[in-house]
Image (cartoon, rainbow, N blue to C red):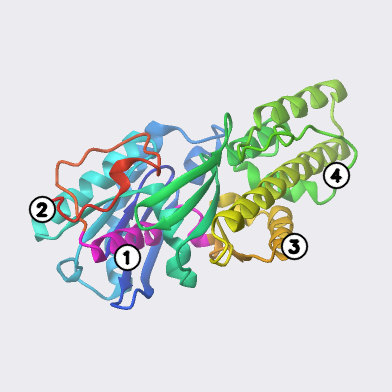
Amino acid sequence: MLGIETSCDETAASVVVRDESGRGRIRSNVVRSQLDEHAAFGGVVPELAARAHVEWLDHIIAQAMDEAGLALDEVDAIAATAGPGLIGGVLVGLTTAKALAASLGKPLLAVNHLEGHALTARLTDGVAFPYLMLLVSGGHSQFVLVRGVGDYERWGGTIDDALGEAFDKVAKLLSLGHPGGPAVERIARSGDPKRFKFPRPLLREERLDFSFSGLKTAVRLQAEALAPLSDQDVADIAASFQAAVTDIVATRSRQALERFKAEFGGAPAQLVVAGGVAANQEISAALRAVVAEIGARLVVPPIALCTDNGAMIAWAGAERLALGAHDKLDVAARPRWPLDTPDMKVNSDAA
């Protein structure tokens, strides 16, 4: 399976093999980050991202095929992100995949980007259904029950900012650069996480939703009150912010795992973490403590496969193809595409 990913600011292609037993192997995984193109703007500029995908995608696909030791006509099918994401970038990858599928006479798999994240742990760790996914990235923060390929139930999500977005905005406020997650984590190491008591929104409520907008506002107000900020002020604010989000994620994860155990008493409780925020060491340590307390299993794929990449798209396509699914060449790109929609169900009759 050739997988193509262009939903945001990574241009990626990968070749993945899925054998008859369901085991996977990555033959190649090429990712070109656009970080340098967007750094001056403090965030991703959609038009620049789409142009970069147009310029680089053919080269990235060629490199992926070369590293896999295969010609294009030797793959069994073509998978590409069809959404959600920045629509200009999604169109570049999906249109390229359609052209390849049509010219080679291969099946097309239009993959939901979130399903790519949801199924990656099956590629890397052979995780069995059902399991709980915590997706924490620049665009998404949600708990999803993964019952099977195409069978998802959203248990909770952010009602405002995604966690990665909150990290980016706090980093910009503190002039730490982009991307914000690594920058905040780095400066927080020299800060006092107890100096400022920032709010933990929604934690008194039982629902599994997140809210980071009020926390972000509290950080801004504290920074304005202390201005001009010393280096220690910046480090302490970053550390206190990180401590707040770590508490929020850990508490919500404990609640989600307790619900999982209550609903699936006979199944082992498994928490799969996906998205770039999974690289944060403080959050990872807190999650390890939670699963140890609950008696659950924590699965975090290698960080290169937690962030956007072509291997997760190829694998999701392979999992769907194995069940007989494929898509028509007129399938549409989508800027929004929740996992828990009826059209995510595997339809092997989609000719």
Amino acid carrying label 2: it is Ala
Circles 2 and 4 in contact, beta carbons < 8 Å: no
Q: What is the number of the mark on residue 193?
A: 4
How far, Cα to Cα, is label 1 from label 4? 43 Å
Amino acid carrying label 4: it is Pro
Is disc 2 surrounded by few (<14), some (14 to 19) or many (20+) residues within 10 Å? Answer: some
Q: Secondary structure at mark 4?
A: loop
Nearer the observer, 199 or 227: 199
Q: Is residue 323 magenta?
A: yes
Q: What is the number of the mark on residue 64?
A: 1
Mark 2 or 1 closer to N-term? 1
Mark 1 or 4 closer to N-term? 1
Q: What is the number of the mark on residue 293?
A: 3
Horizontal side of 79 relative to 10 (left or right) equals left
- The residue sitting at 37% across, 32% down in the picture is 47
- The residue sitting at 44% across, 44% down in the picture is 9
For the N terminus, the quadrant is bottom left
Mark 2 or 3 closer to N-term? 2
Answer whether residue 54 is visible to the viewer in this image.
Answer: no
Locate residue 286: give its quadrant: bottom right
Residue 212 point in image, percent of width and height:
66, 32
Is disc 3 surrounded by few (<14), some (14 to 19) or many (20+) residues within 10 Å? Answer: few
Magenta part of the protein: which range? 304-324
- The residue sitting at 32% across, 65% down in the picture is 64
Q: Which label sits in the foreground, 4 or 3?
A: 3
Q: What is the number of the mark on residue 102?
A: 2
- The residue sitting at 29% across, 64% down in the picture is 318
Mark 1 or 3 closer to N-term? 1
How far, Cα to Cα, is label 1 from label 3? 42 Å
How far, Cα to Cα, is label 2 from label 1? 20 Å
